[in-house]
Image: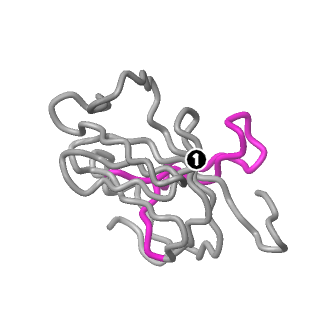
């Protein structure tokens, strides 16, 4: 758990499963989000303090929960700060804060970039959340 301007924030991780199974994320958006209920690390765990893991449609429905939260920040280890991860479609769009869009194949060659020599072995995105509610639904 981190503090940011007096507001309680939490670290989450978004791990793509590709094939239109992942949630899109947009900085500044307050909305309903699905999380993997089976992953409950302690806030000071060895995994860097990750409190939530985003659910994707390849996970068991029995292990999910729904919460409302505000997406404060998105960060990718190689791309840096992101303003959005758009997972709607068979190509995902990772948009950096400076407006650059990185288009990634999510169907035939998941994780392959278009028109780039950049090698990205890990597409995990670190997500800072605030205004996280208690679960509003389970098994969704």
Taking depth in this image into account, of 127 and 46 the one nearest to the observer is: 127
Q: Residue at x 54, y 72 (%)?
A: 28
Apparent side of residue 70 relative to residue 91 in the rendered image (left or right): right
Q: Residue at x 41, y 59 (%)?
A: 64
Taking depth in this image into account, of 21 and 29 the one nearest to the observer is: 29
Identify whether 27 is placed above or below 7.
above
Identify whether 61 is placed above or below 123.
below
Quadrant of the rendering where the C terminus is positioned: bottom left
State yes or no: residue 55 in magenta: yes
Residue position for label 1:
75
Residue 71, image x and y in percent? 56, 66
Taking depth in this image into account, of 131 and 93 the one nearest to the observer is: 93
Q: Residue at x 28, y 45 (%)?
A: 58
Principal secondary structure, stretch drawn in magenta: loop
Apparent side of residue 24 relative to residue 132 in the rendered image (left or right): left
| Magenta region | 31-56
Quadrant of the rendering where the N terminus is positioned: bottom right
Residue 3, image x and y in percent? 81, 63
Identify whether 52 is placed above or below 130.
above
Residue 65, image x and y in percent? 44, 64
Q: Residue at x 18, y 37 (%)?
A: 107
The single residue placed furthest to the left in the displayed view is 108
The part of the image, by quadrant, that contains residue 6 is bottom right
Apparent side of residue 75 relative to residue 110 in the rendered image (left or right): right
State yes or no: residue 58 in magenta: no
Apparent side of residue 32 relative to residue 115 in the rendered image (left or right): right
Residue 119, image x and y in percent? 42, 21
Q: SS at mark 1? A: strand
């Amino acid at each position: 758990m981190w503090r940011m301007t007096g507001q309680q924030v939490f670290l989450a991780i978004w791990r793509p499963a590709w094939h239109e199974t992942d949630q899109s994320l947009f900085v500044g958006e307050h909305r309903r989000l699905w999380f993997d209920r089976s992953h409950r690390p302690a806030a000071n765990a060895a995994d860097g303090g990750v409190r939530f893991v985003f659910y994707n449609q390849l996970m068991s429905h029995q292990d999910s929960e729904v919460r409302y939260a505000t997406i404060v920040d998105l960060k990718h280890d190689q791309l840096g700060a992101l303003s959005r991860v758009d997972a709607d479609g068979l190509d995902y769009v990772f948009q950096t804060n400076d407006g650059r869009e990185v288009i990634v194949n999510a169907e035939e060659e998941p994780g392959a970039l278009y028109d780039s020599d950049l090698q990205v072995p890990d597409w995990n995105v670190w997500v800072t959340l605030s205004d996280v509610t208690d679960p509003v639904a389970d098994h969704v």
